[in-house]
Image (cartoon, helix red, strand yellow):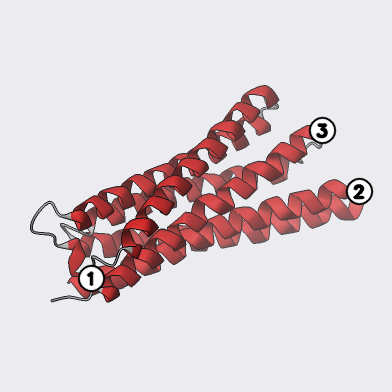
Amino acid sequence: MSVVATWFWLSGLRERDIIKKSVDHVKYIVDTVNYMNEMIKHVSMEEYEKALEYFRKADEAEKKADVVKRSIIEELSRGVIHPLDREHLLRLILVSDDIAAHAKAVVRRLKIIVGMKYRIPVELMEIVKQMSQKIVEAANFVLKAIEMLGTNPRSSLLFASDIEKLEEDVDVLRIEALETLMRYCRAEFGPECIMFKELIDNLEATSDKCEDTGDMIRAIAISLS
């Protein structure tokens, strides 16, 4: 039996419920990332009230993901699954949860930026929007990859490769964003420069966690192949 045999359940036992919860967990993570992306769009259009609505939605989605995460951990702690399978599931849940945590950090930074009435330079904002959109794509690939683990692990490997490529794209955009920020701050340095730098770093961290989750999915998919 494979190390991650719990992905091949033969009947509706407790393990099947855990996987369903795992998919639900990632759906809330994707919601968090989508709301982050929408907030960025509305900030770029200076639609600040609308942007704050998406802050609240992102915050709520991340909290829902936490509730499901705790429920899964509680199920796993009961020891009804093989220890090695349990370890894989736990690592997958914790790593994927970090995606939502960093996306929430992004919207928190944006909320401060809006509250302080800082205006993100147009050129920088365009790069931030590109980074965010690629993170949305990566998060959706994470969901698809997890959904395919039980039926077509090889497809999960393909999605994991797509996630990796998107993470590399975000890394390139991050350098562009930092160069743009340095030009702006060299001419006019203020406290907003620190906040903009943190925003860029949080976006990169969100992307990195998508890739980390993709790597975990790879490990599971290879064991199942």
Figure check: 130 above or below 44 = below
Q: Quadrant of the N terminus?
A: bottom left
| Residue 165 visible in the current orientation | no
Q: Residue at x 76, y 39 (%)?
A: 113
Residue 75 left/right relative to 40: left
Residue type (three-letter) at the residue carrying disc 3: Lys
Q: Position of residue 124 (x, y in %)?
A: 71, 46
Lower position in the chain sequence, tag 1 or tag 2 = 1
Q: Residue at x 29, y 56 (%)?
A: 146
* Marks 3/2: CA–CA distance: 16 Å
* Marks 1/2: CA–CA distance: 54 Å
Lower position in the chain sequence, tag 1 or tag 3 = 1
Give the label, 1 or 3, closer to the camera. 1
Label 1 residue SS: loop
Please rate how many residues cluster around mark 3, counting C-alpha atoms within 10 Å: few if below 14, some from 14 to 19, many from 20. Answer: few
| Residue 52 visible in the current orientation | yes
Residue 206 left/right relative to 139: right
Q: Label 2: which residue?
A: 188
Residue type (three-letter) at the residue carrying disc 1: Val
Q: Label 1: which residue?
A: 4
Task: Depth check: give the residue in front, 95 or 34.
Answer: 95
Please rate how many residues cluster around mark 2, counting C-alpha atoms within 10 Å: few if below 14, some from 14 to 19, many from 20. Answer: few
Figure check: 200 above or below 116 = below
Q: Position of residue 193 (x, y in %)?
A: 82, 51
Q: Position of residue 46 (x, y in %)?
A: 70, 27
Give the label, 1 or 2, closer to the camera. 1
Q: Label 3: which residue?
A: 117
